[in-house]
Image (cartoon, rainbow, N blue to C red):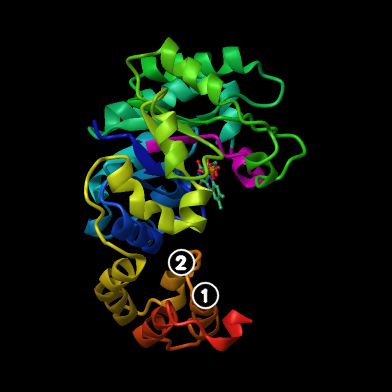
Amino acid sequence: SHDYRFSVAPMMDWTDRHCRVFHRQLTRRALLYTEMLTTGAIIHGDRERLLGFDACEHPVALQLGGSDPHELALAARIGEAFGYDEINLNVGCPSDRVRDGRFGACLMAEPELVARCVDAMKRAVAVPVTVKCRIGIDDQDPEVALDTLARAVVASGSDALIVHARKAWLNGLSPKENRDIPPLDYDRVYRLKRAMPGVPVIINGGIPGIDDAKAHLAHVDGVMLGRAAYQEPWRLLSVDTDIFGEAAPHASMQDALEAMMPYIEQQLARGTRLHVITRHFVGAFHAVPGARAFRRHLAEQGVKPGAGLEVLREAIARIGAPAPAEAA
Ligand code: FMN
């Protein structure tokens, strides 16, 4: 079992392998999650493209979407063979596409099925198997729904529970609205931890930064940041010091980006476009002169066909050197 104190959430289109390599330059200790991958994609798709990752990303967890125990077991085994350190089951994602396949948050209403899924995954792999869920859906009573799901999956061997501390309302809200509108209830997650003291409980949802993350750790075993980590990655530079009491991997964002250069060079040589990597750097700098010029340079030059490392170097050179336009 690993250290659950701090993790970066699974986020589709965002936490791809390039993003995770970037985040790894900012914190050695955070547990990183993939985007959700469906069992169908893993079983029938291009596995190297979907599952391949860089060795520097460890510890890294693979999130699966599905509700067929046999398929989940197979996908989990494939993920473990690729080297993932944990397999996580998505019981919290409300998107329509996902609901049609009968997985994600709608599974909050089917705790016995989820328990069978976890049981099958546990039997298939040796790495930890975890579940990410909501506190409930629609008109469920979270006091009942969350405990029922938690007890069912823990009985099947789930090694930890990650709880997005709000309901998903599956009728009428878009996935984005479902990450903002249903009210947060951190106390509900704290009560789950008190009811199941032996099980690692990780809290997620609306946590704005590392100071707040640290405060939650008085009540639960771990904190998972999503949007704050992705949109304001500079926050991750203080995770190792503030949460783990260890030195940060790099003293500055500039140094962290510098450390990305060999990886980017290797990816460019394999035909990856620069922007596919540098798009994750948009929020790298905050409240420093040149931050806007950095973003603008990457956005305008980084997307050009054949853009190379020099574009990133030029963008970094804007930091600390305010352009006249920026002062205006
Ligand atoms: N949650 C999942 O369990 N699987 C996903 O694939 C997933 N994709 C997401 C994509 C985006 C762009 C965002 C913003 C969120 C996604 N989420 C997904 C939800 C996050 O993991 C997290 O639970 C949610 O954003 C709340 O945390 P936050 O307030 O710290 O962002």
| Any part of residue 45 in sight | no
Question: Which callout, 1 or 2, points to the residue nearer the camera?
Answer: 2
> In this view, which residue lies farthest toward the front?
327
> Circle 1 sits in a helix, a strand or a loop, which is it?
helix
Q: Where does the image place residue 162, in percent across and percent down from the top left?
A: 44, 31
The residue that label 2 is drawn on is 285
Mark with earlier residue (1, 2): 2
Asked if residue 195 is positioned above or below residue 244 in the image, the reply reads: above
Crowding at mark 2 (Cα within 10 Å: few <14, some 14-19, many 20+): many
Depth order, front residue of 228/279: 228
Kind of residue indicated by mark 1: Arg
> Circle 2 sits in a helix, a strand or a loop, which is it?
loop
Where is the C terminus found, in terms of image quarters?
A: bottom right
Identify which residue is drawn at 49% across, 46% down: 226
Identify which residue is drawn at 35% across, 55% down: 237
Residue stretch in magenta: 88-101
91 within the magenta span: yes
Please tell me in which quadrant of the rendered image residue 87 appears: top left
Q: CA distance from mark 1 to mark 2?
A: 9 Å
Mark number for residue 295? 1
Depth order, front residue of 137/20: 20
Where is the N terminus found, in terms of image quarters?
A: top left
